[in-house]
Image (cartoon, helix red, strand yellow):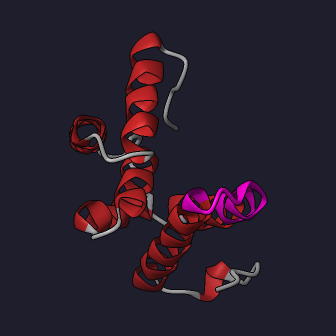
Amino acid sequence: MIFRKIRLDAMAVDQLVVRFAAITAAQDDALLGNELTKFNRLFDRMMEVSEELKGRPGDQRRALIALYNHPNMQVQLQAAKLTLAVVSDEARRKIEAIASSRWLPQSGDAGMCLLNLDRGIFKPT
């Protein structure tokens, strides 16, 4: 599935959450297939969705919390990382659980996220 740049401002929040989940699940496939260029394009699409949610009244990134129990670990991890600024304690607990899961490569990414948070290198906005 190719995720072209589209007008996100015309989409409802629940549609954006569905798009986010599809994009991040595709990221997982790209990671497993060692397709870095594809992953990077998908990362850009994911950030566009996140920025659209952030710009909505009340910062609608909190809608991504619904993905914390998604069957795909990459979807869960990206949702947690991108909600750190709006629900920091809950998001951190989710990232800690992923780090403890030993589900590679997401557990490694989660562990690095926690390390960077604790060191002040990563400051969610």
Q: Is residue 114 left or right of residue 92?
A: right
Q: Quadrant of residue 51?
A: bottom right
Q: Position of residue 41 (x, y in %)?
A: 74, 63
Residue drawn at x 67%, y 59% as measured from the top left: 39
Is the magenta region chiefly helix, strand or loop? helix
Q: Position of residue 4 (x, y in %)?
A: 75, 81
Residue drawn at x 35%, y 66% as measured from the top left: 72
Q: Position of residue 8 (x, y in %)?
A: 64, 80
Instruction: In this rendered view, identify the residue nearer to me: 46 or 109.
Output: 109
Looking at the image, residue 10 lies above or below residue 79: below
Of all residues, the one furthest to the top in this rendering is 119
Looking at the image, residue 1 lies above or below residue 52: below
Residue 99 visible? The answer is yes
Residue drawn at x 55%, y 72% as measured from the top left: 26
Say which quadrant the N terminus sits in: bottom right
Q: Is residue 15 left or right of residue 64?
A: right
Q: Quadrant of residue 89?
A: top left
Instruction: In this rendered view, identify the residue nearer to me: 61 or 43.
Output: 43
Query: Does residue 11 show up magenta in the picture?
Result: no
Residue drawn at x 64%, y 80% as measured from the top left: 9
Q: Position of residue 37 (x, y in %)?
A: 78, 58
Q: Is residue 39 left or right of residue 107?
A: right
Residue 58 visible? The answer is no
**What are the residue bounds of the magenta stretch?**
31-43
Looking at the image, residue 122 lies above or below residue 74: above
Q: Is residue 26 left or right of residue 69?
A: right
